[in-house]
Image (cartoon, helix red, strand yellow):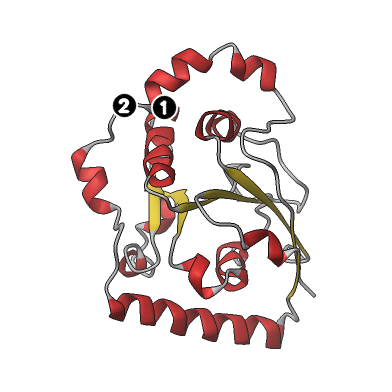
């Protein structure tokens, strides 16, 4: 069985390492206010046509059916996604199924406004690259500066879109929660949007 638990954190609330980040608030605020590169902006599709939206709903229905059929997926706290406006969805990362699992629990209205952050090496894979624009994948190079990747995240959120992130930065090799990368704390503090923590239980097994 796979269980997804969703909670809600008020905008701007950062329970851990807040003092350290606040000391850098001015610096990070200035960095994140910088415009992203034009080629990066063109690669992020902010508006999709009717066919692309229909394909999203179709794949959402198929994946949801398969996951509920074979993995008996259960979702708790889905009502936390009913809020309006941009939000950051943060989930633990313990399996290769986590991305599709997150995709399948979003409702149809939410999914069309949600962008998924991940490593460029995965999203540029020949089996995945065709789906980058269709499913709103945002590839981040592991050699990219933290400020540059956060600028991209800020651009998406300021455009009124949701952002889905794995704050551990990599898949856990033993199923336990790994330390978060500092970028997520900075983004939460500076973006001042709602945060939806998601815990995926059972996917590693």
The numbered disc on residue 147 is: 1
Q: Against 54, is 6 above or below?
A: above
Q: Residue at x 38, y 70 (%)?
A: 127
Q: For the residue labelled by badge 2, is the local secondary structure a helix, a strand or a loop?
A: loop
Q: Position of residue 144 (x, y in %)?
A: 38, 33
- Mark 1 closeness class: few <14, some 14–19, many ≥20 residues within 10 Å: some
Q: Secondary structure at mark 1?
A: helix
The percent coordinates of residue 182 (x first, y second) are 59, 29
**What residue is shown with label 2?**
34
* Quadrant (top left, top right, bottom left, bottom right) of the C terminus: bottom right
Query: How far from the left and from the top, in percent, is residue 181?
Result: 60, 33
Identified at 44% across, 34% down, the residue is: 150
Q: Residue at 61%, 42% (x, y): give it.
A: 167
User: In the rendered structure, are the residues bearing label 2 and label 1 in contact, judged by CB atoms less than 8 Å apart?
Assistant: yes
In this view, which residue lies farthest toward the top?
Answer: 23
Q: Residues within 10 Å of mark 2 (few under 14, many from 20)?
A: some
Residue for point 68% across, 41% down = 10
**Position above or below: 130 against 19:** below
């Amino acid at each position: 069985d796979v269980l997804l638990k969703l909670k809600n954190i008020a905008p701007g609330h950062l329970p851990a390492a807040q003092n350290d980040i606040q000391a850098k608030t001015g610096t990070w605020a200035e960095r994140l206010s910088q415009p992203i590169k034009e080629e990066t902006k063109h690669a992020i599709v902010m508006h999709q046509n009717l066919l692309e939206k229909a394909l999203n709903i179709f794949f959402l229905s198929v994946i949801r059916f398969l996951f509920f059929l074979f993995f008996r997926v259960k979702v708790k706290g889905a009502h936390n996604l009913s809020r309006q406006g941009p939000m950051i969805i943060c989930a633990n990362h313990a399996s290769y199924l986590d991305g599709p699992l997150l995709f399948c629990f979003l409702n149809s209205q939410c999914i069309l406004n949600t962008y998924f952050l991940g490593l460029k090496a995965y999203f540029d894979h020949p089996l995945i690259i065709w789906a980058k624009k269709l499913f709103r994948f945002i590839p981040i190079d592991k050699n990219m500066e933290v400020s540059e990747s956060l600028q991209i995240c800020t651009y998406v959120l300021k455009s009124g879109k949701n952002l889905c992130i794995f704050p551990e930065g990599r898949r856990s090799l033993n199923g336990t929660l790994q330390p978060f990368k500092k970028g997520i704390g900075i983004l939460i503090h500076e973006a001042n949007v709602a945060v939806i923590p998601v815990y995926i239980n059972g996917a590693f097994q």
